[in-house]
Amino acid sequence: MSREAHRLAGGYFWYFATIGLFVPYWPLFLAGRGFDSVQIGLAMGVFAAMRVVGPPAYAHWADVTGRPVQLLKAASVAALCCALTFHWLESRWAIILLLAVYSALWNGVMSVYDAYVLGRLDADSGRYGLLRLWGSLGFVAVAVLAGRGLELTGLDALPLVLAALIGANWATIRGLETGVGTPTGQQRTSLGPVLEDRRVQVFLAVAFLMIASHGAYYSFFSLYLQRLGYSGTAIGALWAWAVIAEIGVFLLARPLLARYSLRTLVVFALGATTLRWLALAFWADSATVVFASQTLHLASFGLFHLCSVSIAQVLFPRDAAARGQALHGSVGYGLGGMVGSLVSGWLWSEVSPEAAFVAGALAALAATALAAAGLRGLPSRPESGVPDGGAPRSGSGSAPGDPRRAGR
């Protein structure tokens, strides 16, 4: 890889290393600070809700100024300060409040970074996958090491480790090229006409349902396994295996996108997600079944994420790329994550843990039907003129290297 490619890959590695620490172990950290299941669901819901605020604000700033790297560096410093502060907080409400601030700061980063990277690659999603897989490797490395490490040091060390990982991210991205996209002051495309496209509306609804279906998984999977007698090391290894499985998708991104339509791939990912949640609902006492369900992470996250960033890139003009990625993140990971966390928290407490995963399966099934019916006729590349059934796209951009067919 070139020096720039190393830096781009490093940005993904360290960012998702923070996620590899946060997602598996943060609910356990909260439980250690006295949170019950409803309060954990509330805290994770607040964390997800702030994704509605952070990504659009960041994307607007990045698109308007044309200086995304400066924004990313500033966000890293602010998030690092939040992580350090968690170490000394004891009040549950203070932790939830700071978690909201941290989420708004840190969750706004990836939509801007994705748009930046795709801009540097000229929207070639195949090359994107090869860089993005380093994020999966970062997640795996930390999820595995932290499982054993936190057993030895105690969960109170988690915020300090989180701060160190954020600091490594800042050190990596500080050397990136500072400008990409539309120069400051140039007129930018309004999102209004783009949002009138039926496929954009369906895409956002599918993203909402898909991420909402993950509510029980992201909020309670570690607690669920702990309750069933799995060790901390086993829990970390299962999280890590899920991300190892998704790496295969990123390695095969170019041939997958060349051979199959985005619609076909999305429908497959959604159907596999439905099966995944049903397996966890009814057979999680079997380590073999849990291992198999974690393998399906290659579809429920890896394939869906690859398709989502590609769909956003083809449906939104280049000078609105960051805003398009941010809107997808806000509706999916923000609204969808918030609703999924709150509903799963209530079902976990008032009905059963299994009911929370069944609800996720139903949401994924609804998304499958919606995507199959409503994502026909996707354009084959960003800003491809006048796609079938779509309005003209403004801006200039080159076609990616992988020839994706229109959705069928």
Image (tube, grey):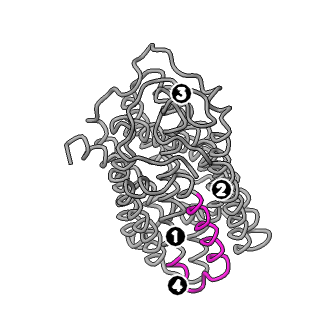
Cα distance in 3D space between marks 1 and 3: 35 Å
Count residues near mark 4 (Cα–Cα under 10 Å), then give few for <14, some for 14-19, many for 20+: some
Q: Residues within 10 Å of mark 2 (few under 14, many from 20)?
A: some
Q: Find residue 17 and report its image quarter.
A: bottom left
Mark 2 or mark 4: which is in front?
Answer: 2
Q: At label 4, which amino acid type do we have? A: Ala
Position of 335 relative to 362 (above/below): above
Residue under label 3, please give it. Answer: 393
User: For the stretch drawn in magenta, what is the main secondary structure?
Assistant: helix
Q: In the rendered structure, does residue 280 fall within the stretch colored magenta?
A: yes
Q: Secondary structure at mark 4?
A: helix
Of the numbered discs 2 and 4, the one sitting upstream in the chain is: 4
Task: List the residue tagged with mark 2.
Answer: 372
User: Which of the two labelled residues, at mark 4 and mark 1, occupies the earlier sequence position?
Assistant: 4
Residue 164 appearing in the image: no
Q: Residue at x 62, y 76 (%)?
A: 280
Q: Position of residue 98 (x, y in %)?
A: 57, 44
Q: Secondary structure at mark 3?
A: loop
Q: Which stretch did the figure color magenta?
A: 267-292
Task: Reply yes or no: does residue 24 show up in magenta.
Answer: no
Of label 3 and label 2, which has the lower sequence position? 2
> For mark 1, does the 10 Å Cα neighbourhood hold few (<14), some (14 to 19), or many (20 or more) residues?
many
For marks 2 and 1 on the same chain, the one whose residue lies earlier in the sequence:
1
Residue shown at 62%/48% (left/top)? 376
Residue type highlighted by circle 3: Arg
Name the secondary structure under disc 2.
Answer: helix
Identify residue for label 1: 296
The answer for how far apart the CA atoms under marks 3 and 2 are is 24 Å
The residue lying at 56 percent from left, 26 percent from top is 392
